[in-house]
Structure formats: C-alpha cells, structure tokens
Image: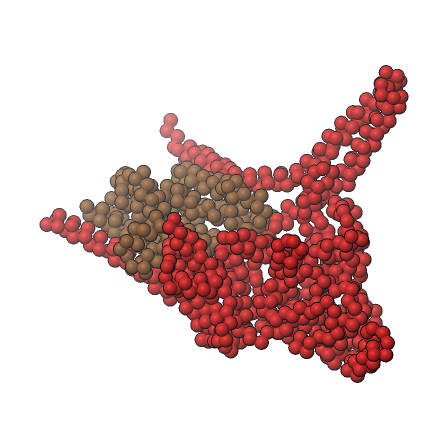
Amino acid sequence: MRNIWIIAKRELAGYFATPLALVFIVIFLALTGAFTFYLGRFFDNGQADLEAFFRFHPWLYLILIPAVAMRLWAEERKSGTIELLMTLPVTTAQAVLGKFVAAWAFCGIALALTFPVWVTVNVLGEPDNGVIVAGYVGSFLMAGAFMSIGACMSAMTKNQVIAFIISATVCFLFTMSGLDLVLNFFQAWAPALIVDTVASLSFLVRFDAVMRGVIDLRDVLFFVSLIAFFLFTNVIVVEVKKSA
Amino acid sequence: MNALKTIDRNRLAVIGVGLAAVLFLAVNLAVNLSLRSAQVDLTERGLYTLSDGTRKVLTSLTEPITLRLYFTRALGERYPGHQAYANRVRELLERYVNISGGKIRLEVKNPEAFSEVEDEAVTFGLQGLPYDQSGDRGYFGLAGTNSVDGKAVIPYFTTEREPFLEYDLTKLVYSLATLDRPVVGMVARLPVEGGFMMGQRPVPAWAVISQIRELFDVRTMPAEFNAVPPEIGMLMLVHPKNLSDETLYAIDQFVMRGGRVLAFIDPNAETEAPSPQGPAGPSDIDRLLKSWGVTFIKDKVAADLQSARRVNVRHEGQITQVDYVAWNTLDRRNLDTTDAVVADIRDLNVGSAGILEPAEGATTTFRPLVTTSEDSEALDVAKLQGRIDIVALFRDFKASGKKLTMAARVTGPVKSAFPDGPPLIGEGEDAEKARLERAKTHLAEAQKPLNAVIVADTDVLHEGLWAEIRNVNGEQLLVPYAGNSDFVINAVENLSGGDVLLGLRSRGDSKRPFLMVEKIQLEAERKFRAEQEKLAKELQETQKRIEGLTNREGANSEAILTAEEKTAIAEFRRKMIDIRHDLRNVQHALRKDIDALDAWLKFLNIAAIPLILGFAALVIAVARRLSRARARPVTE
C-alpha cells in the first residue's frame, strides 16, 4: 500500500513538473465551459441544473483522457526508465496501481476545478444539489474507467500516438456499446444473455443513469470492475513485455 | 528453452486476460440480475424512491392483478436508451410485485414481429413503433387486468413521461384494484367534459376531468336537479351560476346530510366565452357560501407580484416580456403544507383567481389552503376583461401587505341556507303541496360537520395552465409542469373519504428557473417601465408642439416663422432626438444587466480558472528560478 502511495505521489508530482498537466487542465476547463455555455446553451435554457454541463463529459473524456494516459507507460518504455522502475523494490501491480491512482487523481483535480459552474448554478437559482453530486460522482467514476483503458493500452506500445489511437478506439466502443455497431458483432454467435451484458457495458447509458441523481450499486460496480479488469490486464501486459 | 518459457508466459497471459474478461462479464451479469434495488436516490424530492401513496395502494390490494409488460427486444438493441428505460420499468414492477405480497403477478413478454405475442399486444391496444427499414414494429407498453375482466393499459412508455412513471403505474394498479369507486357528482357550467361544437370537431374533456374519471365514478348532474342521488358522496361544482332555487336546495340538503363539496368558483373564468352582452360574469352560489361561512369577493381578483407569471405582450408595437400579476405560479410558501390536499404539491398555477374570506359570525372554521404572498393586490375584475393592459397592471401594482386567500378548506357545523324549508317550485296549490311534502324531510341543520374545499379559480383546472401537450409518435402526451392535477385529484380523493392516493405524487420535476435572472429582470422593468412611459409621453408632446408651430400658418409656414420660433423648433427637434435616444437606451437597459451577467458567467466558467492557474504557474516558475539562482554557489 505504502509503495502504491509513494509511486502515486511521485507520478502526480511529475505531472506538475512540466507545463503539460497545466495545459491539459486548461483545455479541459475551457472546453467544458465552452460546451456548457455555447453548445449546451446553459444560460439560454434558464434551468438551474447541470445537465448541459455533464452531457458532454463522455465525449470530452473520449479525447482528453487517452491523451493523458498515452504517456503513462509508453513514455517509460521508450525512454527506458521502465527498467529503472522495475529495479525498484516494488511489484508490477504496485507500479500499475500507483500510476493509475495518480492519473485518476489528476482527472479528479481537473473535475474539481470546474467548481465555478456549480457555484454559478447555485447563485442563479435553486438547483437539485443531490443530482449534481451524483453527476460529479458518476463523471469521476467514468473518468477512472476511461483512464484504466488508456493506461492498459499505453503499456502495449512504445509509441504514444498509437497508444492514443488504440485507447480512444476502445473507449469509443465502450461508450457506444449497446448500439448496433457493437452488438452486431456479438449477435452473430453469442447467446442473448451475453448480448444483453455487452449492451449494458455502454458508458453513455450508465452515466445517464447516474446523472439522473440515482447512484445505483450496479453502475458503481460496473465502473469499478471495469477499472479492475483493465488494471489487471495492464499488470499482465507490463509483466509480459518485461520478460520479452 | 528460454523461448518456450516466453511462449508459455504469453499463453498464460492471454489465458489470464481471457479469464479476467469472463469474470468481469460474469460479475456484471450476476450483479445486474441480483442487485435490483440497491441504490441511493440523491434527488431532492426522492424522485426515484417509491412514495407512501404507492406503498399504501399496493399493500391495500385485495384482488389479484396481472400486469403484462410488453417490450420488443430488438427495439432495445436498436436504442440502448429504450433498453435502459425498459429495465427500469421492469425493476419497478418487480418491486410492486414484492410489496403487494403476491397480489400482483408480472409477465414480461417479447412481442416479435408477426408473433402471437404481437397480436396479443395489439389486442390490448398497445402501440407499436416501426424501428427499422423493414417496418417491423416494436412494442413497449403495459396491459393490466383484474379478476373481473377490468383492463387498463399504458400503450407506450415514452421517455418524456419518465418522471411520472411511478405515478402512472400506481394509478393503473389502483384503477384495477378499486372495483367500488367513490361516486362523484359533477355540476359544471364550463365545458369540462368536452362535447361537440356545432359543425366542428369534437372537443375532448379537460385533462384533469379525464384523470378523475380514471380513478372515480364521475356522474354528470343535469342542468337542473331537485335531489342528489344517495350514492353520490361528493359534489364537484365548477363555476356554478344561474342555479335555480331547486338545484341550490338540492345541494344544500346534500350538504346537510353530510355530503362533501369541492367547489371551483371564479370571478373571472378565463375559459368561459364572453356573452354578446359583455363579460360572462362570476360564479354565483352566494346563498350556499353564506350558510357555510364563506364570503367570495366577486368583483376582485387576487394579484401577486412575487408569483406573477412572465408573459409576452405587445406593448407600443414591440413584443416585450412582462410579469402578469394576475397569473400566478404559487409555490410551497403559498400553500398550507400541513393539509394533506396540498402537502405534496410543489407548485400550482392559477389564472386570475378570486378572493375568499371567512364570513362574519361563521360557525365554521376557515382554513386557507392557497394564499398569495404579502406582495398582493385586490384588482378590479373589470381590469381583466376586454383588452387587458398587462403592462399597466404591472406598472400600477401597489402591494397591500396582506395575504389573500385563493382556496380554503371549510369545516364545522352549518345550518341550511333555506331556513324556511324547501323553496316553492311553480305556482298554485299543487306546488305548495309538493313543498310541504318535501318539507317533511327537510334538514335545518347538518347531520355531520361540513367538509368543503372552495377554490376561487376555475382556470386552475384547465391543462393550458399546468401541462404541456406534446405530440409523441402521433399521440398527444400530457407532460405536467405544475401540480394542478395532483391538487385536484388529492382534493377529490380526500373529500370522497379516501386517503390511499394521498402522498402519491406525479413528481414531474418542476422547472427550476434562474431566480436571479428573474429578479434582475423584474427590477429593471420596475425601474425603467415608468421612465419609458414618461419618455414616450414627452416624445408625443414634443412632436405635437413642433406640429403646432409648423402648421400654424398653413402648409408652407416655415418661411414666415420668426427667428425665435425657428430656434424653438430646432430645440424641440433636438429634444425629440434626445428622447428617442433615451428611449432606445431604456429598452436596451432592460436587457443590459442580463447580457452582462451572461458574459460574466461565460468568462468565469471558461477563462477565469485557466487564467488563475496560468498565473499561479508563472509565479511558481519564477519563484523556482529565483530560488535556484540564489542556491547556486558563487564560483568566482
């Protein structure tokens, strides 16, 4: 546990050692703000809720989180620091978890910095703050899911651009899962139960449910188990590459 | 050997990942199937938590009910949103089954194209929607039946009505469960039950009346009647007026026997067509009201500034928004939340409601249910008839500092409004004989204390004031935005002796307006409206003066004007341009503060934090550089 914490702290500090993290946060904040106010027409709608704000989160994450995640392992492998990391007295699992926690916390910081929109909606009217809390919890969980996919994909290649493209594609499939596009692939061979399960993997549908103001244990478990699966795969990929 | 080891490791890795994937899917599958109601509802009003009303309905079931949920799987595959909603409906119904203790049986069916199940769904009256190119139809509806062949149907679950899901389901179960529905007598002088207009399409009944019909046995009373049938336990009076003595007496005696009354009276029924002679006139049951201890002020309307509804009006050739003080959206501050009828109502829309007061020397208790704020004014009804100057009503509004009562519950002992016995109907000896005959059963005092709810507005009933009608898949769908129908149904149920439905809320998430923006608008309007009027008047006067000067000596008078007069005209023209300019500024100022707020919020939410972060980063970078420079040892 201590090792995970140390790695996470070191990684998180690493983010802020270069202006890169700042640029990401600024882009995220500016885009969420612009989408909320211009595309979502937040002010013109005149409704004291944050629907226009949360609606764009899956799409923003789809692009921004793979961009944050792409360097997690690819960079280490390219620059060779991965060997150095592996010589430290930490297990691969601890390293994977540490890096993930740092990256997820980084997303959390970016999300927390959107607080002006919460203040705004409370100044303008009397929103249902319970629904807003649920929206933030859902958005954070979803960011974790995107991040675990991104981290896993980053471990598969040395090339950051390829890591970005693969993870954006996988994230896209998870976001849109439940649509014909994805389901047709399963319908041909899988029983209805599997097709139903695949359909239930859609980030959009899961996040929509949380955004309504209801935190369902099934939605939470979905995101948590998805994160666990990709972190496990991440560990295996790093192990295999290490031994290769 | 080494290579073999690597292959093994790779194979092991693939197997591991495969197993993890299977585990991941299995966990989610198991969780989806087993964990049905483990959720935290964070919504302020518990939108997704079953209400007490639903629990009461379900636990009081005595007869078995079968519910058949039809959902075409292919529809869910095509539209994941539909699948999620169908899951929610199914889970909610499963909870109904649990709470009902087995009284409800649920069947979930998949009506595929050209299947027997599809025929069954169609027979029940479910609505199919084409979902792909081939024109196959998908179904997503509910059909319920009870043991006596009663049936109730939701033809299609549309997402627009998702917030009302529990309400719709519970009402459906309730309508199947109650075989002996309370009987409500309806006396209406407004076309609440629809009908046929000469040469026009049939007019549907008002939505709230249709909703009452789903839950109660509504009997329409004839225009004149001399007795209320004994099976009727409650009378609903809508805009009663021009009632004969005979009818008034029948209502009076009904009340003396312990009958309940829900009356909607109105000084200015906006849904009533004016007669050729002028305004249609207020409701009139003064004689009865007096005996019940209520005074209805017929020539005044309750106006309230705080709850005024914003409307678009044409004023001086321009469309402007203004608060219509006689149309109000009343919220919890205006409702007596200790009374079950309004306890769960979040907001109520009324249109030019009247004022009720307790009568002097009344034996009854007068309990206001719906009142205005203290920012209220009793307006003359005449101001709301003919051409209404909404802007003037707003401009000239003077708060009385008094709360006015728009609806009240009246309870307690009462005496007959006919102390001398039944009225004489017709003339001659026979009529007198009949009167004496009726006098034998005359009740001078109520056998049970009066229990009446009087609402000084009839427009509150009309859906135009509380619901949006959306056309979804060719079907008219009612989406309420105020709690009017809940209020009316609560009142009917409460007065007809039931309490099962009380606490069942339709819980449509009410609109949550930007109160701050509304306040700014209101203040700007109050500030500028008077100035605008003053400037407009000044402009008119200046124009007249110029015209007066130039027209003095005929058409071509400019030539013979004196130098002073020319200066005066030039001065007036300049003033006119100034006034026009000021007027434009005033118009602009009405919107200025809001535009400024919009711009500020955009800045704060889009750029402020990034700028602060950038600045902070800069400061930190400079500080670091400085401290590094300081720490560097001096070598030379």
- Measuring 76% from the left and 47% from the top, which residue is drawn there? B387
Quadrant of the rendered image containing residue B543: top right
x and y percentages locating residue B259 in the rendered image: 70, 75
Furthest toward the bottom, the residue is B440
Quadrant of the rendered image containing residue B250: bottom right
- Measuring 64% from the left and 60% from the top, which residue is drawn there? B194
Quadrant of the rendered image containing residue A194: bottom left
Q: Nearer the viewer, residue B80 or B631?
A: B80
Q: As drawn, is B223 to the left or to the right of A73?
A: right
Chain identifier matching the red colour in the rendered picture: B
x and y percentages locating residue B332 in the rendered image: 65, 60
x and y percentages locating residue B18 in the rendered image: 25, 55
Q: Answer above or below: position of A186 versus B175.
A: above
x and y percentages locating residue A191 in the rendered image: 29, 59
Q: As drawn, is B10 to the left or to the right of B41?
A: left
Chain identifier matching the brown colour in the rendered picture: A
- Measuring 53% from the left and 55% from the top, which residue is drawn there? B475
